[in-house]
Amino acid sequence: MSFRFSRTRIVLFLLVLSALAFPALADNVTISGTVDFAALDGSALDHDHTANGVFTVDDGDLTVLGTIENNDDFGGGGISALPMRFNVSGNLVVAAGAAIRAENQRGGGNGGDLTFTVGGNATVGGTISTSRLTGANPSGTDHAGAISLTAGGTVNLQSGSVVSAGAVDGVAGVITISGGNAVTVGGLVAAGPSSSVSASTKYTGLILTGGAAQMTGGTITIRSTSHNEPAVIVTADAIVVSQGETAGAGTVTIEGCNVQVRGLVASLARTGAGARVALRSGTDLLVDGTDLAGSGGTRRGMVRVDATQQSAPSPMLSALSKTSVPRRPKNGTSKKPPASDPAPYQVPPIAMAALGGWLYVIENQRLWRVSPTTGDYVQIDSCAR
């Protein structure tokens, strides 16, 4: 009896050692083909095994190679798309050519909300969309869904990726992207009438094509909570835009420890109010448009806060950083600006159209207002708050 008991204890001990030495393999999930969300939710691939509107991968990665959709095509016109939530303990990958869609594709109705909570890194090479694509909403009240992507690690929106909460004739959705480590934006992030970019006018006129007169741009927030620098990079291929019509645009906010803008960031209203961009950095802030005069290059940074018609109210750009905002001396001289008084110097090219819009900069414990046309500094407060 004693021998049996001892042998059992030894076997159990060896099993424990084996479990510690060889941890269980991650239960990764890969989605291919076109799949309706209702078929995934509560399925064998769903780790919570419950049809509750949440697709869970609680001990691995989620890789999407095909399309997951929850659109309004399950009924007649006037039916809205349904929301989807994804909880992933590991990494999320939406590969190039893949898509996750909760779109209102016909008749009245709204786009569905999309929520991603990711423990590891999030990489998007394909499309994430909650857009309202049809034009049957003269009141302008139907709306796109909201998009929320929160990752504990890095967020990488690759070149060619699309994150869109558009509404061709209604209210664009709210887009929130947050990373616990570096956030890199290399694709299109759009809360406007569509996800189609007008390449010929994106720097001077409309950025996104389409849109009825009652269309309203949505709010976009991109942030990193990391202390590693640079925390947020907007690459030369990237476009981050809120665009509206007569009802106005939404605020675009980018914040983190060291924000570098080498692509296009814009809040654009045709005739309405609300156009605003806020760039916030705990350390350095860079808008680098060195290569804008040419056709290529990796430094194509531009911040547009404007409208395409003179009747629009004055837009506003806020650029807040702990250290100085990069700027250039007037008249092409190489002299560096003094730390105490940047008034004789100019900021790099920042386009806000000739509407009387101003750039506000907190620097050296003073609040400065910078002309969008001349780049001149005007001190308006000796103690920044």
Image: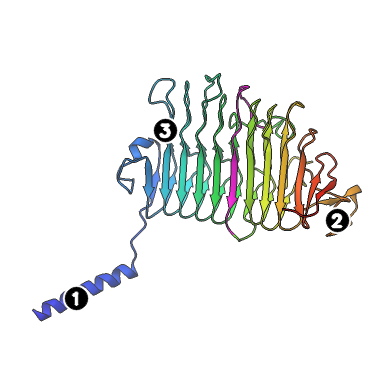
Question: Mark 3 sits on what residue?
Answer: 82
Q: Given this view, does label 2 or label 1 mark the residue nearer the observer?
A: 2
From the top left corner, tell me how far across and down residue 86 is, in percent.
42, 45
Q: Which residues are magenta?
A: 207-226
Say which element carries label 2: loop
Q: Quadrant of the N terminus?
A: bottom left
* Count of numbered tags: 3
**Up-down: is 207 above or below 45?**
above
As measured in the structure, the alpha-carbon distance from the residue carrying label 2 to the one carrying label 1 is 77 Å
Q: Find out whether the residues at labels 2 and 3 contact each other: C-beta distance under 8 Å.
A: no
From the top left corner, tell me how far across and down residue 129 is, in percent.
51, 35
As measured in the structure, the alpha-carbon distance from the residue carrying label 1 to the one carrying label 3 is 53 Å
Left or right relative to 130: residue 345: right
Residue at 50 percent across and 43 percent down: it is 148
What secondary structure is the stretch in magenta mostly built from? Answer: loop
> Which amino acid is tagged 3?
Leu
